[in-house]
């Protein structure tokens, strides 16, 4: 047999010559999934990285090939059936769909849901259901800002919020006297680190800015106040809905909305409504979207007969135009695509919708914005080659290995090998088959590759 045995990405081998070694997988019925292995088996499994054939492994172990085949059969056959065999030498990571699927966000076009997932429900979710700020982003909806809330090598050794401030100040967007608005600031980590960066690195600018946080959830606004308490002279907090923001025209010179617009309602649309619908056939909540399509000439020729549109995000473009002063800038970060129609992202107790950035840009341009759309990693100048842990290994660590050792679960962060080593201490050196991949291709907590940054520049006022 010339095939190379490989452990699936979700399996982690714990090997200790002095203690019992085991192979761990994702939890089964909430119970850690562990298979005890002998030292001899562990030595074999450590070499199952998809690069060596059975005979090469036998040579490395100074064992008879027949003995090694017997061990391989134990792990490839029932009841364990964990070992896979690659036909060619593995030279590139290809996620195994069966082991990765449980960790992927469930994406699907769910048009029926858009009827019920209306403004009232979303409003209620944010004002009443969110009950714990940290838990919200640790387990319900981990954002990129949350996964990179600690200094990270891909961000040049600073956190997401600090890098955000650094990049914006380097392109001259945070000058003296800037009135900044952050909409939907979650835990408040981004604001905290943004302001700390300015305080430490641009103290004169820091003294002359004012940072306002607008937030719908009372629990999150409390967390935002706590996180930014040190910056109290330059910060204020306002409870309210972004689409009904209680500020007058031209109040802000910089607006930030980080992973917030996907929380706004999306509605169902049909080609036939666009082509020849009469108002009485069209559901009430879709009517404003139809008006946008007509008024802003939004191209929907490439859509399926039924599709979703990001109505809330479209309305937000108008709101932002209104709130920005002339010469002001807004930065909108969200999950989505330049050309894909919204898909539902089902999270615990609420559904969000990915953003069709092409439509958003079209509206922004018509409103009078100059725009720039780029990948989030490019916008923040993240290092795409930094190695980070994938979600399969993250899941097995938290579901099986750490509970086995009565250790606290890992926080939901994008872990480099060094960061994981620091968290796990000695245990880290006993673990094998941990999957790290370059950030540009990793499917782990906080993978920025499907996120975009849309920068909106409002032109200076024309001299009268
Ligand atoms: C997915 S979270 C992102 C939080 C944070 N910006 C981050 O990146 O971690 C969305 C945030 O927007 C807030 N939000 C949702 N809908 C809102 C609305 N209509 N008006 C104001 N804030 C809203 C949520 O409460 C939450 O703080």
Image (cartoon, rainbow, N blue to C red):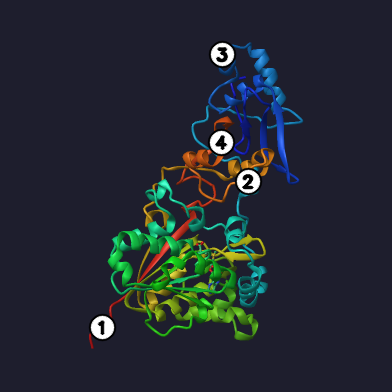
In the rendered structure, are the residues bearing label 1 and label 2 in contact, judged by CB atoms less than 8 Å apart? no
Of residues 362 and 391, which is closer to you in this image? 391
Q: Which mark sits nearer the N-terminus, 3 or 4?
A: 3
Quickly name the residue at label 1. Answer: 462
Is 286 above or below relative to 69? below
Question: Could you say where residue 447 lies in the image, as x and y percent from the top left?
Answer: 50, 51
Residue 182 visible to the viewer: yes
- Mark 4 falls on what kind of element? loop
Q: Is residue 208 left or right of residue 222?
A: left
- Mark 1 falls on what kind of element? loop
Q: Residues within 10 Å of mark 1 (few under 14, many from 20)?
A: few
Question: Could you say where residue 256 lies in the image, as x and y percent from the top left?
Answer: 42, 68
Quickly name the residue at label 4. Answer: 434
Mark 1 vs mark 3, CA separation in Å: 78 Å
x 46%, y 65%: residue: 357
Quickly name the residue at label 3. Answer: 59
Q: Which mark sits nearer the N-terminus, 3 or 2?
A: 3
Quickly name the residue at label 2. Answer: 408
Q: Which mark sits nearer the N-terminus, 1 or 3?
A: 3
Question: Could you say where residue 342 lies in the image, as x and y percent from the top left?
Answer: 55, 65
Mark 1 vs mark 2, CA separation in Å: 59 Å
Q: Quadrant of the N terminus?
A: top right
Of residues 94 and 291, which is closer to you in this image? 94
Of residues 103 and 36, which is closer to you in this image? 36
In the rendered structure, are the residues bearing label 4 and label 1 in contact, judged by CB atoms less than 8 Å apart? no
In the rendered structure, are the residues bearing label 3 and label 4 in contact, judged by CB atoms less than 8 Å apart? no
Is 219 above or below relative to 464? above
């Amino acid at each position: 047999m010339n095939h190379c045995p490989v452990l699936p990405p979700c399996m982690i081998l714990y090997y200790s010559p002095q203690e019992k070694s085991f192979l761990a997988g994702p939890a089964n019925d909430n119970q850690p999934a562990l298979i005890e292995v002998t030292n001899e088996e562990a030595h074999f499994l450590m070499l199952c990285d998809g690069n060596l054939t059975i005979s090469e492994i036998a040579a490395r172990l100074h064992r008879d090939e027949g003995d090694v085949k017997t061990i391989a059969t134990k792990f490839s056959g029932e009841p364990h059936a964990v070992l896979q065999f690659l036909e060619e030498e593995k030279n590139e990571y290809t996620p195994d769909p069966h082991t990765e699927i449980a960790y992927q966000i469930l994406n699907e076009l769910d048009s029926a849901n858009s009827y019920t997932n209306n403004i009232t429900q979303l409003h209620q979710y944010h004002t009443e259901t969110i009950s714990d700020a940290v838990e919200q982003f640790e387990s319900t909806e981990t954002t990129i800002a949350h996964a990179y809330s600690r200094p990270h090598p891909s961000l040049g050794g600073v956190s997401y919020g600090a890098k955000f401030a650094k990049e914006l100040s380097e392109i001259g967007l945070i000058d003296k006297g800037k009135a900044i608005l952050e909409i939907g600031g979650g835990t408040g980590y981004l604001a905290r680190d943004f302001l700390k960066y300015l305080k430490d690195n641009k103290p004169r600018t820091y003294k002359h800015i004012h940072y306002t946080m607008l937030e719908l959830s009372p629990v999150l606004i409390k967390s935002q106040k706590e996180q930014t308490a040190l910056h109290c002279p330059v910060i204020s907090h306002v409870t309210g809905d972004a689409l009904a923001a209680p500020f007058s025209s031209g109040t802000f010179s910089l607006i930030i909305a980080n992973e917030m617009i996907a929380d706004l309602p999306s509605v169902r649309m049909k080609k036939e409504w666009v082509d020849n619908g009469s108002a009485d056939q069209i559901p009430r909540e879709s009517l404003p979207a139809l008006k946008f399509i007509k008024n802003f000439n939004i191209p929907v020729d490439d859509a399926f007969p039924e599709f979703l549109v990001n109505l809330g995000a479209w309305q937000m473009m108008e709101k932002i135009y209104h709130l920005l002063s002339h010469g002001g800038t807004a930065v909108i970060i969200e999950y989505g695509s330049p050309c894909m129609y919204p898909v539902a992202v089902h999270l615990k107790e609420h559904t969000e919708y990915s953003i069709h950035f092409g439509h958003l840009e079209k509206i922004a341009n018509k409103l009078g914005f100059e725009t720039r759309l780029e990948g989030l990693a490019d916008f923040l100048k993240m290092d795409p080659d930094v190695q980070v842990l994938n979600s399969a290994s993250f899941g097995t660590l938290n579901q099986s290995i750490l509970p086995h050792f009565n250790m606290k679960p890992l926080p939901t962060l994008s872990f480099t090998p060094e960061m994981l080593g620091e968290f796990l201490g000695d245990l880290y050196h006993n673990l094998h088959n941990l999957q790290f991949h370059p950030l540009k291709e990793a499917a782990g907590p906080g993978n920025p590759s499907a996120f975009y940054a849309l920068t909106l520049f409002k032109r200076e006022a024309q001299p009268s």
